[in-house]
Image: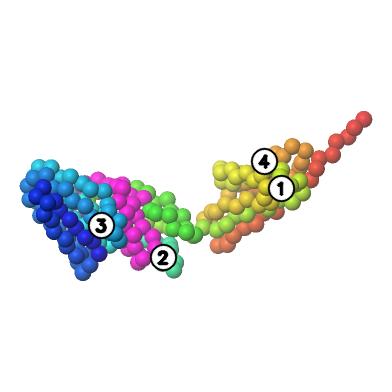
Amino acid sequence: SFGLGIDYGTGMGIATNLQNSSVLLLNLTTGNVVYTVNTGGTPLKPLTLPGSSGMLIIDPNYDALDVVPLGYVVREVSFLEHGISPIQNWGIKVNGYTANSVTSSALLYEAPGNYTYAPLQVSGYSSHASGNFSVSDSNVYVNVNYSKTYSIQFMESGLKAGTQWGVTFDGNTLLSNSGDSVSFVAVNGTYNFSVGNVTGYAVSPQNGLIKVSGSGVSVYLNFSMKSYLVN
């Protein structure tokens, strides 16, 4: 639930319990109104509304709030999640505010305007569904696609302890100074990899393709000391 406090400069205020209400639309009187909103005991950033009256919109299902002029009609913005199974906590960040959900949809209320959004990270999944949406005269629906990720592990043998080695996978490079493995995560697909040069050693395989298809992949890298012919 949310607690709402409004200071009109007189030291007086009100507290409203929104536990049983999905949305509060509060008409603000004219003047310089300062309010703070608490969720779970953590205060959000105070906001000062100078001048004319407006509506304060608060959704107790997420840590978001907005102020719009009177006469505006707020619309529902539904983010529809696809790909997370079984469903777990996920969320969307919209213009700096965060909406979390444990169902397949996250509902916000927004005034007319243009907005940016980005999905929050979910353990074991990846999403590149960041984008923009506009609110005008109807409700908005935005699809958010998540893909399951799998572990890609490269394991070496043959190097002396403490020897630095590394792997580039799908354009990303990881180095290891003390361990015998490095790990990446990836969704289903086909990826390039290459192993960095280690002075005095040859490695097999040094590069190749990895196909990820519904499970993790392990790649074994065999290092061997180079031999040189001395005349």
Q: Mark 2 points at which residue?
A: 88
**Residue 135 in magenta stretch:** no
- Binning the other alpha carbons within 10 Å of mark 1 as few (below 14), some (14 to 19) or many (20 upward) gives some
The tag earlier along the polypeptide, 2 or 4, is: 2
Q: Name the residue under label 1.
A: 205
Mark 1 belongs to which amino acid?
A: Pro
Residue 84: image x %, image y %? 43, 63
Q: Name the residue under label 4.
A: 196
Mark 2 belongs to which amino acid?
A: Gln
- Binning the other alpha carbons within 10 Å of mark 4 as few (below 14), some (14 to 19) or many (20 upward) gives some
**Residue 117 in magenta stretch:** yes
The Cα atoms of the two marked residues, 1 and 2, are separated by 39 Å
The Cα atoms of the two marked residues, 1 and 4, are separated by 11 Å
Q: In which quarter of the image is the N terminus?
A: bottom left
Q: In this view, does 96 lie above or below 91?
A: above
Residue 193: image x %, image y %? 62, 46
| Residue plotted at (92% across, 30% down) | 231
Residue 38: image x %, image y %? 25, 57
Residue 178: image x %, image y %? 68, 47
| Front in this rendered view, residue 27 or 70 | 27
Q: What stretch is highlighted in magenta?
A: 89-118
Q: Main secondary structure of the magenta part?
A: strand
Pair 3/2: label in front: 3
Q: Name the residue under label 3.
A: 38
Pair 1/4: label in front: 4
| Front in this rendered view, residue 3 or 146 | 3
Mark 4 belongs to which amino acid?
A: Gly
